[in-house]
Image (cartoon, helix red, strand yellow):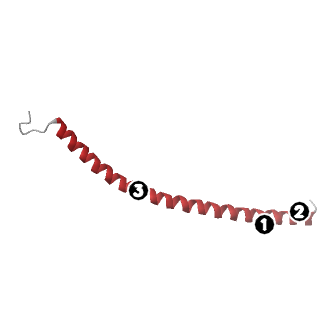
Amino acid sequence: MTNGKQTNYELLKDVMEALERLESKMDRRLCVVEAEVDQLQSFRDNLLGKLAVAWFVISFFAMAVWEYIRSKLNL
């Protein structure tokens, strides 16, 4: 039944080997992308924390100035 042609089992084996190679390539690429995404998320989280602190300080001083102005104008 082989007559120079591959059997179904051999063909399936070849397909599985090709898929395994493709899967390993994709896995390596995805690992690199995941590492880069993790770095970007860390940077974003760090930046958001700094912005929250800066916003708190700006708000605190703005309210202090507003209260000072209100006390001088007796509002």
Could you classify mark 2 by the number of other residues whose Cα lies within 10 Å: few (under 14), some (14-19), or many (20 or more)?
few
Q: Determine which residue is flagged by label 1.
A: 61
Q: Is residue 63 above or below residue 8?
A: below
Q: Position of residue 7 (x, y in %)?
A: 14, 36
Q: Residue at x 46, y 60 (%)?
A: 36
Q: Say which of 16 and 55 sits in front.
A: 16
Name the residue rendered at 29%, 48% in the picture.
20
Query: The residue under label 1 is which amino acid type?
Result: Phe
The residue wearing badge 2 is 70
Query: Which numbered marker is on residue 31?
Result: 3
Res. 30 image quadrant: bottom left
- Going by the numbered disc 2, the residue's amino acid type is Arg
Q: Secondary structure at mark 3?
A: helix
Label 3, label 1: how far apart the Cα atoms are? 46 Å
Q: Is residue 57 left or right of residue 48?
A: right
Q: Of helix, strand and loop, which one carries label 1?
A: helix
Foreground mark, 1 or 2? 1
Residue 60: x, y in percent? 78, 63
- Where's residue 45, x and y in %? 59, 59
Say which label, 3 or 1, has the lower sequence index: 3
For disc 1, the neighbor class at 10 Å (few under 14, some 14 to 19, many from 20) is: few
Which quadrant is the N terminus positioned in?
A: top left
